[in-house]
Image (tube, rainbow, N blue to C red):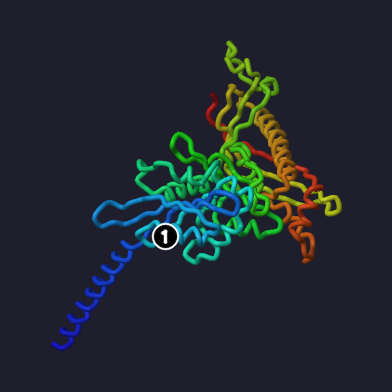
Amino acid sequence: MLKVRKRIFFTVLIFGILFVSGCVEQKQLEKLALVTAAGYDLEKKNVIRGTVVVHQFDPMAQNITRMISTTANTSKGLRQGQNLKSNQKLVTGQMRCVIYSKELAKKGVIQLVDALNRDSTVGNMVYLTVADGSAKEIMDVDNTNTKISLGTYIYNLIKQNVESEQILSPTLQEFNHNYYDIGRDPVLPVLKVQNQDVIIKALALFKDDRYVAELGAKQHFYLKILSDRYKAGTHELGFKRSDFEKIRMKKGEHSIRDVYNKLFIDIDNINSHAKLKMIDKKTLKFMVEVKLDSRLLESTEPLDFSNPSSVKFIEKKLNLAMEKDIKGLLKYFQKLGVDPVGIGNEYKAHLRGKNLSKKEWRELYKRASFEVHVKNRIVKTGVID
């Protein structure tokens, strides 16, 4: 009997503790405003405008999302000012993304990034981005139709493009790694407001912590190939129609596309591997070898694939075009003085423990030369338009 009473007592005690803790947790949550996105603009010299999107809980109404904006000289000063405008304490444990205006990014963002690093409640997987314009403009977009906070919406936008291998991962962890790595520079997505929606416009190239230029969507493909193993993503290449005359299937009447004398081919990358190797340390000559398995998805002209030699012909044309594009992209990076590919890492690997400063690598990088070889194997042919 005693054992039964003890068992009942402990059962009631456990349920009581769970009930009380549940009430405490609910009351605590009602006192907090969860920051899901933070944006920073350069208001004037040494003055920053900080804007946050917060998610609040109200037991008497639906969940509320609101925007709070203020100005200060530091991120901590911004947080104090934002709290003065909120009836609930701001917490950053659920922050999904951070947006820096292009004007601010040109001046440098490391002070603000370092503040994120020092905040133990901010996770390493928060996404960093650049706004094409002001960060406040991005955060002011009316996204009530999505039924989720703007921070979550932008997070999902970036996440699905990272997972589909359209862009490189722009997490806080990745930014820190590339910024503090002497032989590599960070890359972040550029957000833009279009038709009252937020889209990824381009990729921002950084020199240390400063924005210097943008990379268009067509170049993302090559940067992804050069930076990492690549298993997805499509790419369109244009050629002279006359170059493919011998493998074109005749259809009688010429199409309206004949006027432009252009033929376009879309390929879908199944698998790729890029190898960067320094072949001459004295002259700083590097060789880039790229191997791809791809599908030919679409062509604006009917091409004859019945003959294996026709496929080899297309592979050769694709190889030459991609070699030219990759070499041009590497020279563009070199002209800007940015190294998102990690050329400097390959150079450091041959120093046998000797120290190399960022300044020293920047100077050496100017006289580097590149030899590019692409081997593209078409494993399937798809839709022909």
- What residue did someone put label 1 on? 83
Question: Where is residue 277 shown, x and y percent of the image?
Answer: 75, 52
Residue 292 appears left or right of 371: left
Image: 8 above or below 253: below
Can the viewer see residue 97 in this picture? no
Residue lying at the far bottom in this picture: please name it: 2
Image: 276 above or below 1: above
Residue 156 appears left or right of 302: left
Under tag 1, what secondary structure? helix
Can the viewer see residue 345 in this picture? yes
Q: How many marks?
A: 1
Question: Where is residue 275 shown, x and y percent of the image?
Answer: 70, 50
Specify the quadrant that holds the N terminus: bottom left
Q: Residue at x 28, y 51 (%)?
A: 62
Residue lying at the far left in this picture: please name it: 1
In front here: 39 or 280?
39
Specify the quadrant that holds the C terminus: top right
In front here: 374 or 50?
50
Write down the quadrant of residue 355 in the picture: bottom right
Question: Where is residue 291 shown, x and y percent of the image?
Answer: 67, 44
Q: Amino acid at mark 1?
A: Asn
